Image: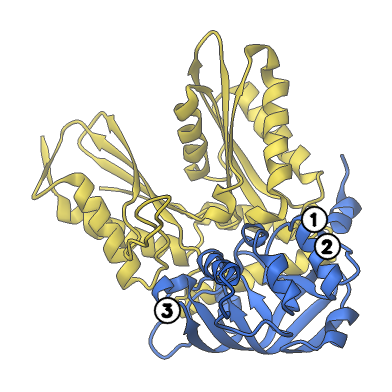
Chain colours: A blue, B yellow
C-alpha cells in the first residue's frame, strides 16, 4: 500500500504501518551512522544527555557525499543498518520511532521495534542521487568533527521508503524472498 | 624505453575517480538493462526503475551515483619498458585520488588507523595492485569500492576433496548471507586457487572484468553460468525485496594452487560495480 506520513512520526502512524507498505515521508528526520551511534551510546552509559531528542523521531543511517554549491546535500543513500544493531535498542527504548537504512536487523532490534511500537524502513541502496533530490534542507546539529558521520537534521519531502519490519514484527525481507525463491 | 611523467598518472587517476562515481560503465549498463527486461516481481521492477532514474540524475546533475564513493582500488599494469620521472609512482597515484575526491565532491571514507579511526579527509591512501608486464604502456583500472558489499565478501580455505561442488556452495552461501546488505542486484567476483591472498585479489580482479565477459576456460564458463542461474533462483531480488534478478553477473578467475588446498575468494559488489580503465 502507498502511504504518506509526517515526520516526526506519531505513535498511531508508526503502529499503522505494515511490512511491504511503500511510504513517502515528509518532515524532519535526523542522520546518524556508526561513529555518531557509538558516541550517543557512550553518552548514555555515562548518564549524559543525547544531542538530539529521540521521542517520535526517525534516524536515517546515512553519511552524505559533500554538497556542490547551491545544493543542500550531496549523494545521500542508506548505509547498512546491521552495524547499528548494537546501539539501536537503547535508542528505541528512549522513544525513537523509526529507522531508515538497508539490510537485515538482529533479533534484539526486532524485539525492541515490537516492544516500542516502532518501524524499520529500507531506502533503496545505491539510489543516493535520487534520494538527494528529496532532501530539501540539511544542517549539522551535533558531532561536527565527525565529518560525513556528523548528526544532521534534514527536511525531506516525499522521501521514498519501504516498511521492512513493522510494529508487529513482520519482516518483508523474509516474506518477499520466499515468494520468488525457486530453489 | 619510454619515459612517462608521473603527473600524467595523477591527472588520469583524478579523472577516473570522478568518472567512475558518476557514470555507469557500458558493460554494467548492458547487464543492468537485461535485468530490467527480465525482472518478474513488480516491486523489484519498480526498484530497478528507480535505480535507473538514479543513474540518470547522477549523470545530468553530477551527484555521485552512491554516497559511498568507496575506497579507491587501483590496478596498475606497468610495461617493463616504461621509466617514470618526476616522482614516485605511488605518490602520484595517491595524489590523483586526493585531487579526485576533494575536487570531485566525493565522500572521504578512509580512516588512518583501523582501530583509532581518524578520517584522512582526502580518501587516501588508495589500495594499489601493481603488475609488471611486457611493453611500454601503462594500463590503469580504478575501481572505487563501497563497503556495504565489501563487508559481505568472504575467503574460504576449502579442501581439495570439496571440489567444484564445495566452490559452488561457498559462493551461494556468501550471496545468501549478503542478501539485502550488498545492494542487489549484485555482481559476484570469484577467485579460485592460488593462496589465501591471491584468491581474494583474483576475486577483486574478476569484478573489474567486463561484467558480460566470459572465462576462456570451458568449465569455468559453465560454472559462471550455473552460479548466476542458481543465485537468481534464491529470490533475493532488487533491494533484497524479492525478485528474480539477484545478480547481474558472476565472473570467475582461476590460478594454480598447492596440492593441499582449494582457496576460494568471493568479492561482492553492488549493481554499479564501478570500474574505469585507461591505457597510457
Q: Residue furthest front?
A: A47
* Residue A44 can be seen, yes or no: yes
**The quarter of the displayed image where residue B267 is located:** top right
Eyeballing the image, is A158 above or below A120? below
Q: Label 3 neighbourhood size at 10 Å, few (<14), some (14-19), many (20+)?
A: few
Q: In the rendered view, does B98 fall on the left or right side of B113?
A: left
Q: Residue furthest top?
A: B259
Q: In the rendered view, does B218 fall on the left or right side of A72?
A: right
- Label drawn at residue A144: 3
Quadrant in which the N terminus of chain B is drawn:
top left
- Mark 2 lies on residue: A111
Q: Nearer the viewer, residue A145 or A94?
A: A94
Query: Pointers 3 and 1 in contact (CB under 8 A)?
Result: no
Q: Nearer the viewer, residue B30 or A68?
A: A68
Query: Pointers 1 and 2 in contact (CB under 8 A)?
Result: yes
Secondary structure of the residue carrying tag 1 is helix
First of labels 2, 3 by sequence position = 2
Count the numbered circles shown: 3
Give the residue at x 11% y 49%. B87
Instruction: Measure the alpha-carbon separation of dots 3 and 1.
Output: 32 Å
**The quarter of the displayed image where residue B77 is located:** top left
Eyeballing the image, is B265 above or below B106? above
Q: In the rendered view, does A54 fall on the left or right side of A165?
A: left
The answer as to whether the residues below labels 2 and 3 share one chain is yes
Secondary structure of the residue carrying tag 3 is helix
Instruction: Measure the alpha-carbon separation of dots 1 and 2.
Output: 6 Å
* Residue B276 can be seen, yes or no: no
Q: Residue furthest left?
A: B86
- Mark 1 lies on residue: A107
**Where in the figure is residue B182, as x and y percent of width and height?**
64, 53
Give the residue at x 89% y 51%. A178
Q: Which chain is indicated by disc 2?
A: A
Amino acid at each position: 500500500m502507498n502511504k504518506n506520513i509526517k515526520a516526526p512520526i506519531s505513535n498511531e502512524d508508526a503502529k499503522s504501518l505494515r511490512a511491504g507498505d511503500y511510504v513517502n515521508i515528509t518532515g524532519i528526520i535526523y542522520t546518524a551512522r556508526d561513529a555518531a551511534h557509538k558516541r550517543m551510546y557512550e553518552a548514555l552509559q555515562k548518564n549524559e544527555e543525547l544531542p538530539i531528542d529521540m521521542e517520535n523521531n526517525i534516524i536515517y543511517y546515512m553519511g552524505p557525499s559533500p554538497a556542490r554549491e547551491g545544493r543542500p546535500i550531496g549523494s545521500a543513500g542508506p548505509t547498512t543498518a546491521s552495524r547499528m544493531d548494537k546501539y539501536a535498542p537503547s535508542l528505541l527504548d528512549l522513544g525513537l520511532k523509526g529507522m531508515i537504512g538497508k539490510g537485515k536487523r538482529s533479533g534484539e532490534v526486532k524485539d525492541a521495534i515490537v516492544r516500542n511500537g516502532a518501524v524499520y524502513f529500507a531506502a533503496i541502496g545505491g539510489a543516493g542521487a535520487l534520494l538527494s533530490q528529496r532532501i530539501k534542507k540539511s544542517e549539522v546539529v551535533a558531532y561536527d568533527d565527525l565529518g560525513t558521520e556528523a548528526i544532521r537534521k534534514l527536511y525531506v519531502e516525499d522521501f521514498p521508503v519501504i516498511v521492512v519490519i513493522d510494529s508487529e514484527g513482520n519482516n518483508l525481507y523474509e516474506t518477499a524472498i520466499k515468494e520468488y525463491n525457486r530453489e | 624505453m619510454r619515459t612517462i611523467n608521473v603527473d600524467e598518472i595523477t591527472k588520469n587517476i583524478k579523472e577516473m575517480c570522478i568518472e567512475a562515481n558518476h557514470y555507469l560503465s557500458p558493460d554494467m549498463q548492458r547487464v543492468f538493462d537485461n535485468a530490467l527486461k527480465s525482472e518478474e516481481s513488480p516491486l523489484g521492477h519498480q526498484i530497478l526503475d528507480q535505480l535507473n532514474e538514479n543513474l540518470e540524475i547522477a549523470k545530468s546533475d553530477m551527484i555521485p551515483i552512491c554516497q559511498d564513493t568507496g575506497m579507491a582500488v587501483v590496478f596498475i599494469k606497468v610495461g617493463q619498458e616504461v621509466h617514470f620521472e618526476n616522482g614516485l609512482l605511488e605518490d602520484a597515484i595517491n595524489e590523483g585520488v586526493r585531487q579526485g575526491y576533494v575536487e570531485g565532491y566525493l565522500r572521504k571514507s578512509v580512516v588512518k588507523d583501523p582501530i583509532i579511526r581518524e578520517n584522512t579527509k582526502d580518501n587516501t591512501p588508495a589500495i594499489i595492485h601493481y603488475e609488471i608486464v611486457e611493453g611500454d604502456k601503462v594500463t590503469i583500472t580504478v575501481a572505487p569500492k563501497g563497503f556495504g558489499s565489501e563487508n559481505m565478501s568472504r575467503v574460504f580455505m576449502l579442501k581439495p576433496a570439496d571440489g567444484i561442488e564445495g566452490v559452488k556452495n561457498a559462493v551461494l552461501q556468501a550471496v545468501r548471507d549478503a542478501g539485502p546488505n550488498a545492494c542487489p542486484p549484485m555482481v559476484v567476483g570469484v577467485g579460485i586457487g592460488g593462496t589465501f591472498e591471491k584468491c581474494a585479489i583474483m576475486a577483486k580482479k574478476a569484478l573489474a572484468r567486463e561484467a558480460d565477459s566470459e572465462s576462456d576456460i570451458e568449465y569455468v564458463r559453465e560454472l559462471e553460468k550455473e552460479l548466476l542461474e542458481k543465485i537468481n533462483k534464491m529470490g533475493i531480488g532488487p533491494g533484497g525485496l524479492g525478485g528474480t534478478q539477484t545478480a547481474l553477473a558472476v565472473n570467475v578467475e582461476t590460478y594454480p594452487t598447492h596440492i593441499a588446498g582449494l582457496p576460494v575468494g568471493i568479492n561482492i559488489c553492488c549493481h554499479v560495480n564501478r570500474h574505469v580503465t585507461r591505457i597510457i
